[in-house]
Image (cartoon, helix red, strand yellow):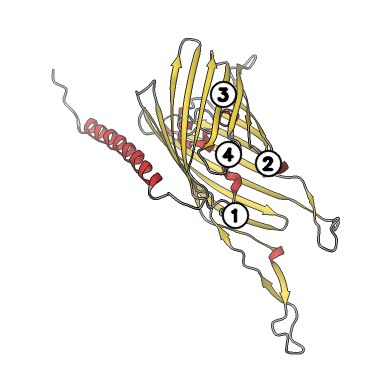
Amino acid sequence: MKKIETPKSLCEDFMLNFIHSKIFQLIVIFLFSNQILFSQNVSKTGTTAASFLEIGVGGSANAMGGAFVGLANDASALYWNVAGITNLERYEAILVHLDWIADTKLDYAGLVLPLGDFGNLGFSFTSLSMEDMKVTTVDQPDGTGEYFTSSNLAIGLSYAKKLTDRFSVGITAKYIKESIWHMSATAMAIDAGTIFRTDLLGGMTIGAVISNFGTEMQMEGIDARYTIRIDETKQGSNENIPTNIEMDSWGLPLHFQIGVSTCAFKSEDYQLIVSTDAIIPNNDYQSLNVGAEFSFMNIFYIRGGYNSLFLQDSEGGLSFGAGVSSDMLLSTAEVNFDYAFRDFGKLKNVHSFSLGIKF
């Protein structure tokens, strides 16, 4: 009997073809824009605010050199590619700690809530902090007795949904704040990502994400306020006219990334995943992240990668790490512990630790 296609099935086929064609167009546009639109002779390093948003999170992702946009298979997908949280079928939380450069510390927490056909929700919190420092002046180089600190934070609310069994989309809205002593700046931004799973090369997945698209940041606070005398030539003029110094505003570190990951080898007990990401930032040259993960019985993981490949004037780049996954006693919950080491050349090497819980 000949199958009669209903208007609903015809509509679904049209949408699938439309989505797949758009993915292909996106990849083509990316390749051309990489060479034409974004080619530059100046790196623009240091021209954006909120640089802490560029610090990658998650022991598994960092150990793989940050090549995680096309993989995004744990709760750290909230940072790397929010569309990846649609692949999480259980509640999942992640806690991350990094001893970052210049004696700063980064802490990250994320939570993913699968809600069935509605999609998946996610919440994330990022904090970069430092110890208090002495306030010094020219006249008092040993300190005034006061202390100051600097801190940064970002709070994110995420939503992602599978449009088909192969194609997922997601978006994150973020509140960002930077503070130093009595001054602070805030901004709002969004991340948007997609993931498309194919049948090619062992189930290759393609991910694309745009990160930190938002408002500019401008410092404000009492340290920018002082008093002046408008006319020095007139006696009796007011010497205490309140004035504010208007600070320059700076954009956020906008990134466009596209990643590909695939299973290069798989048996009953072993699996090897390889991945690569291409990055186009608005404050540096383009670069490439590559990484691999070898797993044994989904219990023990060994990872390695290279960050910022082909980036001019980069420091280090090599990364490696390991992870362990285990079921909790007297519970159906699963715990993952991951460690990553990143080489930063002349700068301090970075150690990353993350704890994941599926429940």
Q: Answer few, some or many: residues within 10 Å of disc 1's Cα (few below 14, many 20 plus, some between 14 and 19).
A: some
The amino acid on which the numbered mark 1 sits, given as a three-letter code, is Thr
- Number of residues whose C-alpha sits closer than 10 Å to that of mark 2, classed few (under 14), some (14–19) or many (20 or more): few
Q: Are marks 3 and 4 in contact (CB under 8 Å)?
A: no
Looking at the image, tell me whether mark 2 or mark 4 is earlier in sequence order. Answer: 2
Q: Which mark is residue 101?
A: 2
Which residue shows up at 38% across the image and 49% down it?
36
Q: Position of residue 170 (x, y in %)?
A: 44, 38
Q: Is residue 274 above or below residue 155?
A: above
Task: Give the secondary structure at mark 1.
Answer: strand
Q: CA distance from mark 3 to mark 1?
A: 36 Å
Mark 2 is on which residue type? Ile
Say which residue appears at 16% left-offset and 22% top-offset.
Answer: 3
If the image is split into quadrants, where does the C terminus sit?
A: top right
Between circles 3 and 4, the one closer to the viewer is 3
- Asked which quadrant contains residue 345, the reply is top right
Earlier in the chain: of badge 3 and badge 1, it is 1
Q: Is residue 219 left or right of residue 89?
A: right
Q: Which percent across, then down, holds residue 155?
A: 59, 44
User: At numbered mark 2, what does the secondary structure look like: helix, strand or loop?
Assistant: helix
Tell me if residue 277 comes above or below residue 222 in the rendering: above
Which residue corresponds to mark 1? 186
Question: In this picture, is 272 found above or below 315?
Answer: above
